[in-house]
């Protein structure tokens, strides 16, 4: 029996976008929410390859340079530490590539970016029933139980936006 080929990690390229979008949809299916995933190749291409992108991505590729996993991330900022960090929006490895080290290598790549740039944190959230919790604990990640995630979206987001009182607030980026 041959051992699995260890994937290579590299920044996402425009030709990877279709595969990454497909994997995002696979992730939504895995998380039992496929109806909530509307990402298109056009949207992801625009986000990753804009003149000044706010979203970044890395892919784990097999021996044929085909993406088998991905990490999509953006910068956050700690006002207490006074430095940026990375927020990992999504990490996914296709089932056939699990056990090859792809997930660990993707996280190690982001950790390396943090260390090289002087960032102090690599943060992410995951659904509470995800079995990856054991993997994350094994690499030293700590569950942030004292922090509760909140989200404002849809009608509630629009309702709060209606309370913006100045033209400056409505047009600020």
Image (tube, helix red, strand yellow):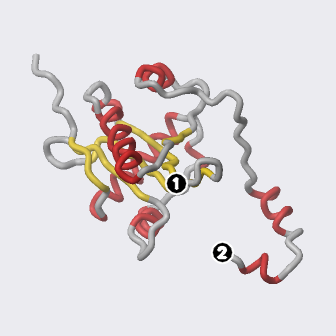
In depth, the one of 115 and 13 nearer the eye is: 115
Q: Position of residue 163 (x, y in %)?
A: 89, 68
**What SS does tag 1 mark?**
strand
Q: Which residue is mark 2?
A: 173
* Residue at the spot 41% in from the left edge and 25% down from the top edge: 139
27 or 144: nearer the eye? 144
Quadrant location, the N terminus: top left
Against 6, is 112 above or below? below
Q: Residue at x 34, y 40 (%)?
A: 106
Vertical side of 172 occupied by 120: above or below = above
The one nearer the camera, 165 or 114, is: 114
Would you say 36 lies left or right of 93 here?
right
Q: Which of the marked residues, 1 or 2, is nearer the chain's N terminus? A: 1
Q: CA distance from mark 1 to mark 2?
A: 19 Å
Viewer-nearest of discs 1 and 2 = 1
- Quadrant showing the C terminus: bottom right
Q: Position of residue 131 (x, y in %)?
A: 49, 22
Q: Residue furthest top?
A: 1
Residue furthest bottom in the image: 167
In the visual, does 124 lie left or right of 13?
right
Residue at disc 2, secondary structure: loop
Count of marks overlaid on the render: 2
Q: Which residue is mark 1?
A: 84
Quadrant of the image occupied by residue 18: bottom left
């Amino acid at each position: 029996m041959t051992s699995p080929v260890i994937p290579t990690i590299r920044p996402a390229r425009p030709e990877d976008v279709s595969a990454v979008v497909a994997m995002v949809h696979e992730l939504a299916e895995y998380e039992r929410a496929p109806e909530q995933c509307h990402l298109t190749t056009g949207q992801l291409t625009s986000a990753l390859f804009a003149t000044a992108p706010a979203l970044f991505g890395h892919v784990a590729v097999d021996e044929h340079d085909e993406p088998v996993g991905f990490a999509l991330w953006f910068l956050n900022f700690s006002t207490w530490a006074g430095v940026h960090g990375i927020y990992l929006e999504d990490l996914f490895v296709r089932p056939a590539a699990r056990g090859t080290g792809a997930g660990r290598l993707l996280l190690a790549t982001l950790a390396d970016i943090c260390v090289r740039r002087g960032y102090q944190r690599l943060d992410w959230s995951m659904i509470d029933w995800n079995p990856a919790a054991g993997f994350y604990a094994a690499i030293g990640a700590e569950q942030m139980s004292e922090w509760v995630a909140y989200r404002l979206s849809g009608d509630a987001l629009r309702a709060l936006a209606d309370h913006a009182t100045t033209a400056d607030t409505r047009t600020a980026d």
